[in-house]
Image (cartoon, coloured by chain):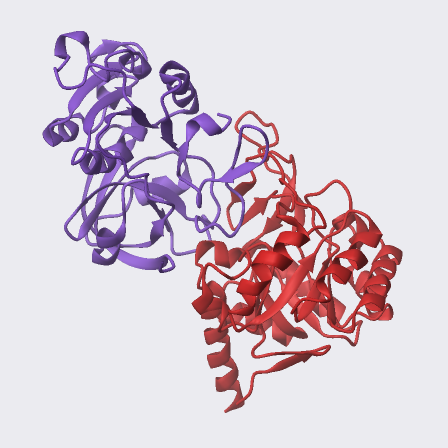
Amino acid sequence: MSYHVRIGRTTFANPVLAASGTFEFGLKFPEVSRRLGGVVTKGITLEPRAGNPPPRIAEFPGGILNSVGLENSGVEVLTTSTLPKMQQLGTRIVVNVAGFRPREFGRLVEHLEEHKVDAYELNLSCPNVKEGGAGFGQDPRLVKRITADVRKQTKRTVVVKLTANFVDPAETAQAAEDAGADAVTVINTLYGLVLDESCRPFLGGRSGGVSGPALKPFALYCVDRVASRVKIPVIGCGGIASGRDALEFLACGARMVQVGTASLVNPRAALCIWLELKALLARRQR
Amino acid sequence: MTSPTSRIARVAARSQLTPDIHSLWLEEPYLARRVKPGQFVNVRCSAGPDPVLRRPISVADVRGTKLRLVYRVKGRGTAMLARFRNGDVIDLLGPLGRPAPPLANLDILVCGGGVGIAPLLFLARQLKGTNRVAAALGARSRQELILVDEFRKLGVRVGVATDDGSSGHHGPVTDLAGNSIGYRETERPPAVRRRPSAAFACGPKPMLAALVRKLHPVPVWGFIEERMGCGTGVCYCCALPKKGGGYVRFCEEGPVVLLNEVEL
């Protein structure tokens, strides 16, 4: 039985991806990366970024918050040093690109066009940066403009990662579809705040992005809502920690899923989830 | 290099060293064989999603097929860990982090405060083979001082300090790291009278900072014990500011880092 999934011009061997920012570049666990549908890179910006001051991670029962702030070495290092190593992994490479001005997304993709990359994921949903990120993803007009701009640069698969922070992701998904996106990822982390013992914001970046099991019901709701609105494939993301969780996202209309926080607990989580999901799908076939 | 993997360890022995510091000997041959001083394991404190994250704990010692974890009960995760019984199984991810730098033919001070004494035991055991090692061990009081006998059994010189004076020197442990290294004047041995040529430290940040100032320009490597996410270098959540800008990811570049190069 084949579990291949085709999105845009890219065929993925199975429907499970490692989510951006939770598996770096897949190079630390090549035996896991190789067996996934693909690896979405950590968010990449035009220039290197130091990221937010610590602490960058906090916990609450059932979930975590992070405030990394897109720390990365920039697109130059990605293309010269990281991508050649990723190409040895034998998995699909999805580069997550993040801009601070709308035009930067197109420029990032332009840089990446001459390198071997399977797909782009436009990060219109990072909750931990002052400019861009979720700010872009909250405005359907900007989602449309940025997606259209990138679409002009590439024939490769373009996925738009959406936010559900103070915006209806069905609206922004529609905008992405109208502008030529091949798929949407639903959802990125939600805004959150945790306080320390003296009731001051705990995270160095003050607020953070909520992820983990607690996010799942809302993510599932968003996937269901978006999938019934747009025709392009939906990639479900949010609190997936088991094959059963992944199956539920597929049942709500997702074509693929991304595993994020679970990989921080167990680096083999995405692979375990795929193997569990495969068993569940096989049982349903019978 | 093989990727760190999740291993199932069995609790072989447990004890309580102070009102809030516990010790676990865990049977896990794979990790016991591979883990080096300076490295840590990331411990799953519950099977469910609460708490979500593992707890990073430096390895305090290894004997045969067993490794020892010494930890302080600080929050819900470590409180759950304290409820494990002999024979229970615990999910460990490791070995993680870089081993402490190998040094030879030096006068080395290891300086620990509170539960920070723990990882220095494993390290001192390795260092003493090729170096002259002295240990400065501190805590708030005699009741809270751990592993002093284990250090003495290693055969290294041991100096003790407590904030309340109930054991050893009355004052911060960094007082012991003066011109002679790590022991009181009366105990000064002939072998190591000079300033240390290198030091390793683990404890509260102010203690680490004080030691760096005091021993300047002697290199001081410190075990960083701060919030961590994955422990494997993928999430970029453990960040320690570097002097001159940027951050060190201490799960990957540490947890033992050259303190002279970071902002404490």
Q: Which chain is purple?
A: B
Horizontal side of B99 relative to B168 (left or right) equals: right
Front position in the image: B258 or A97: B258
Horizontal side of A177 relative to A122 (left or right) equals: right
Front position in the image: B248 or B165: B248
Q: Residue at x 54, y 46 (%)?
A: B236
Residue A72 position within the rendered picture, expressed as x and y whole percent measured from the top left = 62, 48
**Rendering quarter of residue A251:** bottom right
Residue A183 position within the rendered picture, expressed as x and y whole percent measured from the top left = 73, 71
Q: Is residue A33 above or below residue A69?
A: below
Front position in the image: A34 or B144: A34
Q: Residue at x 67, y 80 (%)?
A: A6
Residue A59 position within the rendered picture, expressed as x and y whole percent measured from the top left = 52, 43
Whether residue A174 is visible: no
**Rendering quarter of residue A240:** bottom right
Horizontal side of A239 relative to B110 (left or right) equals: right
Q: Is residue A29 above or below residue A62?
A: below
Please tell me how many numbered marks the rendered image carries: 0
Q: Is residue A50 above or below residue A243?
A: above
Whether residue B160 is visible: yes
Residue A85 position within the rendered picture, expressed as x and y whole percent measured from the top left = 53, 63
Horizontal side of A18 relative to B95 (left or right) equals: right
Q: Which chain is red?
A: A
